Image (cartoon, rainbow, N blue to C red):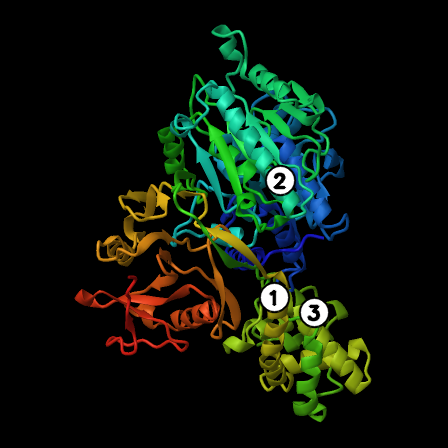
Amino acid sequence: MFALKPFQETAISQLKNEFLSLWKEPNFNIPLVLKSPTGSGKTIMLAQFLRDIVSDPRFEGNDTAFVWFSFSEDSYQQSKKKLFEYYGGASELDLIDLNDLSRGKLRKNDVFFINWQKIKGRSKESRKLRRENEQGLTFDNFINETHEDGRKIVVIIDEEHIGSDTDLALEVVEGLIKPKITLRVSATPKYIPTRADTAGYVEVNRDAVVEAGLIKEKIVFQTEEDLEQKSLKKLDQDEMLLELAFNKRKELIELYKDVKADINPLVLIQLPNDDQATKETSDTTKQTIVLEYLKRKGVKDDKIAVWLSKEKENLEDLEKSNSSVSFLLFKQAAATGWDCPRAGVLVMFREIKNPTFAIQTVGRILRMPFATHFSHPELNIGYLYTNYKRNEVLAEYAKSKTENRPAINGSYRKKNIKPIKLESVFMTRADYNDLGDTFQITFQKVADKKLDTKKLNLKPKITNGLIVGVEIDDYDNFTKELFEEGGSHDEEMSRHDLERLYNLLCFKIIAKQADENKKFAPERSWGKLKTALNVYLMNKLKADRGEVYKIIVNDLASPASELAPIIGDALLSYRPVREKEVNKKAARAKRIERIDVPRDALFFTDLYEKLSVKKSAMEPFWIEGGMFGGVNEKKFIEFLESSKNKNIAWWHKNGDSGSEHFSIPYYNPDENREKLFYPDWIIQTKNKVYIVDTKAGFTAESKDTKYKAEALQVWLKNKKGFDGGIVVQDGPNGWKINCKAKYSYDKSLKGWDILDLN
């Protein structure tokens, strides 16, 4: 069973709301864009979105089918297989493909998978599929018959950036399929709607995906310039790349063993597309060079997989975490859309004729095995070795819209620096802001105290007219349908329609709560509310389910509802109960590790700039550039570098996220949850270690800073040789520090001490 991460639940919820809003529009072919990073689980999110939307109480009456376009034969089969596995083989959705054209048309809730290339081309095969075959089983007829039934179609274009906007492709979608909505999915979409467009847009933040443990914290690049600095001068460039990758794999094997993870790290080796062309000028291809190198290293043939158009070897079970295959040679096959989380090292050979760095290939080493980060930070990083030039790599990233920028600037701990061991905290939080099963207990307690069942109409007649004036989000013409085909306001509502209205009312009452402490995610919670109402009233009134449905619907549809305020009070009472459950679960996921500070090597993206300093433990020293480069941080560096601070042996700038940086836990009562605090600076003097965080202006007086400051003092307590606190600049008087157990700040800095590091 796949467990969705909180960010995925949020994205699915946003996607449904955008979809339902667009569904009300009179237009067709309305774009809905989902921008989500590589490795974020786009296919799984779409699978859950489809399952949710067809059973959503706001939409379930619609007669809709779905056409899912993928960009290749492999990718469409992978997508269909992934949905089948996610649904456990059973679903209200029927997953079909070209083998099912004999059905004649799309039926309600069908999801039809097809390779985009099959119908967008002008080849004989494409013409036959679309218009020219004896059986008449063409894609065009299949779609036209669906339209004849009055069924609306939604198109999903997976990896839409690859080529969905050609004239022919647009002719297929807009001219033939005529979808109500076109859902365009990509990490780097070609089209981003503006506010003026009739369109929808949902974006998943990369940081949320990293925090959830699905993808690596960064990809470390070694470019041609870096290779020249390596101590492997005796090897030619090709062998140098392979040697670096081979050695890195050995390091990862030992680290996985240390954390007791049954993972065999896979090295991906991308051969140049023009590998054959090099035969004209050389006796050997890159493929031969690689295979000969691996043979010299003692790697057996069954440990090497080959995935080329005309050559496929040892590909079975390649994706399994403990597969015996250790190296994969490929050109394009594994470049996009293929998932193998154990792949952590990539070698990319530069193309000879067309040296364009392929960003999408880097995505193959982004995913994390078991969708979690490990206690060794080295396991949470991907490693790329390439002989592309730095400017070639950066030029492609500058053109792309990806957030996965390359960590291309290395910084290394100075040889004379002895790192210190610090206890650092790692944790993930699975908070979906939903009602849990225990809501039944809370509802019962509140209802026992506050609900007078005598005020409920226990013998209501539920007619179609009840819905008139009820404010519900009606996306499927539910209200209109009730009065069609001879129906009237006085006609008793059918059991099916009664349940649909009940579902909508449960959804509505959760979604419309105004008090923050009563707000829960309606998509995940309306069913739990419905269960709590059913269980309580069936037991209290000794009535059957059908009778209770009528009583509840009749009450909730009334402006003077007796149940609505009881539900609100129960939601309020449940908030601390649910937070306690979530915090308990989060505590189980928290772990403490001893890490080296500073690490032996750190890598930064091209958004960082080099700063000339002398006392930094790392060299060269990189600081975030542009508008994000902290003026306050640079002033503090000037202070640390000052000749007045002779006792400073070294200082280190800590990161603000990630397992390779030092963090301590702190509790934020405003959010009622535990979070991580990454102090800015670790300073080693002759006598002690200072851990400080620099603040300025409103950040120094914020509540969050108070919570962090007090948590830091708790961490420092009883730690011999350590000191620290929050630091602010006191104009020309230098810097002051707050080391108090209870933090307070005003502009006079009353109670603060001069920061003296000597």
Query: Residue 112, position in %: x, y?
Result: 67, 41
How many residues crowd mark 3 within 10 Å: few (<14), some (14–19), many (20+)?
A: few
Residue topped by disc 2: 254
Q: Which mark is residue 587?
A: 1
How many residues crowd mark 1 within 10 Å: few (<14), some (14–19), many (20+)?
A: some
Look at label 3 and name its amino acid.
Gly
Query: Residue at 49% across / 20% down in the picture?
Result: 238
Look at label 2 and name its amino acid.
Glu
Quarter in which the C terminus is drawn? bottom left
Query: Residue 673, position in %: x, y?
Result: 53, 70
In the rendered structure, the answer to whether residue 227 lies left or right of residue 239 reads: left
Question: What kind of element bears circle 2?
Answer: helix
For the residue pair 236 and 427, the one nearer the viewer reads as 236
What is the spatial separation of the Cα atoms under label 1 and label 3, in whole angstroms?
A: 56 Å
For the residue pair 305 and 528, the one nearer the viewer reads as 305
For the residue pair 391 and 484, the one nearer the viewer reads as 391
In the rendered structure, the answer to whether residue 696 lies left or right of residue 219 reads: left
Task: Name the quadrant containing residue 80.
Answer: top right
What is the spatial separation of the Cα atoms under label 2 and label 3, in whole angstroms?
A: 72 Å
Query: Residue 736, position in %: x, y?
Result: 27, 68
Does residue 162 show up? no
In the rendered structure, the answer to whether residue 556 lies left or right of residue 703 reads: right
Q: Which mark is residue 636?
A: none
Query: Residue at 37% across / 37% down in the picture?
Result: 398
Of mark 2 and mark 1, the one earlier in the sequence is: 2
